[in-house]
Amino acid sequence: MNYNGRCAICGVHDGALHPEYQRQAKLQTSHRGAPKPDGAPGSKDDTMDVRAINLWALCQWCHAAYDRSHNKRQRSEGHRRRRIDAGELPLPLHGESDEE
Ligand SMILES: [Zn+2]
């Protein structure tokens, strides 16, 4: 990832005064949601995808706007599903009880 210290969307330099917000820009690493090598669509919520092509540097405002442009419900559902797939969350168990 090399954006020469500039936001990949608006081009503001890291630490520079943002012309629109009049505040100091702070670049953050963001996930682009680049397509997978096999052509499958990527997701910017797939934080496990750290391929260089999937990462870019955005200022805090562009980062927030970019992430907001995604359906929030889909995001939390997908996030939960991925965490289950990754073994970070237990699968919901049915029929579990204290019966002897
Ligand atoms: Zn920006």
Image (spheres, helix red, strand yellow):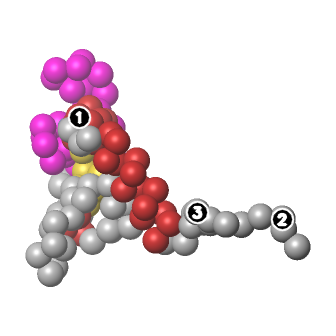
Q: Nearer the viewer, residue 4 or 60?
A: 60
**Which region shows up in magenta?**
5-28
Classify mark 1: residues with Cα within 10 Å, few (<14), some (14-19) or many (20+): few
* Among the 4 quarters of the image, the one containing residue 45: bottom left
Please identify the residue farthest to the front as the structure is shown: 100
Residues at marks 3 and 2 touching, judged by CB atoms closer than 8 Å: no
Which residue carries the number 2 mark?
98
Which residue carries the number 3 mark?
92
Q: Amino acid at mark 1?
A: Ala
Gap in angstroms between the C-alphas marked 2 and 1: 48 Å
Asked whether residue 33 is drawn in magenta, I would say no
Residue occupying image coordinates x 24% and y 42%: 70
**Who comes first in sequence, dot 2 or dot 1?**
1
Which residue carries the number 1 mark?
65
Residue occupying image coordinates x 34% and y 42%: 73
Gap in angstroms between the C-alphas marked 3 and 1: 33 Å
